[in-house]
Image (spheres, rainbow, N blue to C red):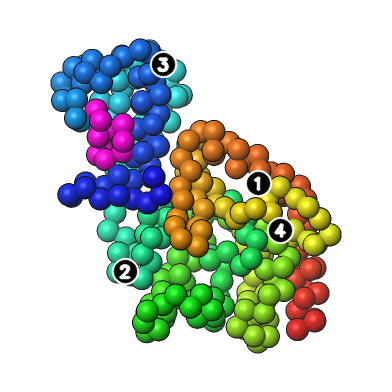
Amino acid sequence: MNRSAQQGNRASTVLGRRLGRELLRLRDAAGRTQQQAAGVISATNSKIVKMEQGWVPMRDPDIQVLCEFYGQRDSVAVGRLLELARLDRERRKAKGWWNQYPHLQAMVEYVALEDIATRLRTWQLAIVPGLLQTPDYARALAVGNGSWDDPDEIDPFVEARMARQARLSGERPLELWAVVQEGALRQLVGGRAVMRAQLEHLRDVAERPNVKVQVLPYLAGAHPGMTSAFTIVSFADEGALDVVYMDTTSTSLWLESDTDAAQHGHLFERITRLGLAQRNSIGVIDGILKEL
């Protein structure tokens, strides 16, 4: 499923679907039916269906009883599921700043997850990552996109994008590891002055201890990330229950399985090995600035 779906006052969320898929996998492996699962938590079959499809928040006691019933007694594995359930409940209850910006449209779910994430790893082919953009650069991208019915909507969209950047500072700053193709830094988005300011900002932000910027140079040649950009969103535990976000021309795509997360984690590692070290990446940025 690509986006957070609605059903009455319920919502199928990315984290809810991730948790539901884990419980479904455990139930199938144990050879249990939905009716049997419903019985052990004194619920209806429809509730098990909603839980496994991510429509409803899940209570810790239900998860613990189901894990026991399915034969999952690994305390670490169960703890990961309980943490995921906690994050999902937090996400559902949140009345975050993003609700003030209908212009975020399909990115609402992503921004809400970004707000509770601990780490992002992003690979970008054509643009500077949103968390590292200047207002003028973001505005130029929006204008160049050409898909706005009302140009007056662009400024609120840019304002919302800038608000996201608060996650890079504060008491619990987000860890960001961004790998950007060299071509994205050379594309004159908004013209020379806008691009110069954007590159200077990128260089400055890269000095923060929680931000790592790498440039993948043209000289890297053919590489495994040539087909698409993506972002891996991570939560409290290292490598635990990551989800992958991909933004395409027509839709926003979430990849929510263990397999997808692991594959993109390995792909990101391969891309980073081809990228320049941060010091050398800053050198490339400085070189482009001199050319401008």
Query: In 3D space, how far apart are the residues under numbered discs 2 and 3 (Cα atoms)?
Result: 42 Å
Per the image, the residue denoted by label 1 is: 268
**Residue, disc 3:** 29
- Compared with 88, 22 (above or below) is above
Q: CA distance from mark 1 to mark 2?
A: 31 Å
Report which residue position mark 2 lands on: 102
Image quadrant assignment for residue 148: bottom left
Q: Residue at x 65, y 46 (%)?
A: 268
Instruction: State the CA–CA distance, disc 3 to disc 4.
Output: 42 Å
Secondary structure state at the residue bearing disc 3: helix
Amino acid type at mark 3: Ala
Query: Can residue 102 be seen here?
Result: yes
Amino acid carrying label 2: it is Pro
Disc 2 crowd, CA 10 A, few/some/many (<14, 14-19, 20+):
some
Q: Earlier in the sequence, mark 3 or mark 1?
A: 3
Residue 280 appears at what percent x and percent y?
80, 62
Q: Earlier in the sequence, mark 4 or mark 2?
A: 2
The residue labelled by disc 4 is: 214
Q: Which residues are magenta?
A: 48-58
In this picture, residue 186 sits left or right of residue 114: right
Q: Is mark 3 in CB contact (under 8 Å) with mark 1?
A: no
Q: Which mark is residue 185?
A: none
Marks 1 and 4, how far apart at CA: 12 Å
Where residue 43 sits: x, y (%)?
16, 24
Marks 3 and 1, how far apart in space?
31 Å
Q: Pointer 4: residues within 10 angstroms few (<14), some, or many (20+)?
A: many
| Nearer to us: label 3 or label 1 | 3
Badge 3 vs badge 4, beta-carbon distance below 8 Å? no
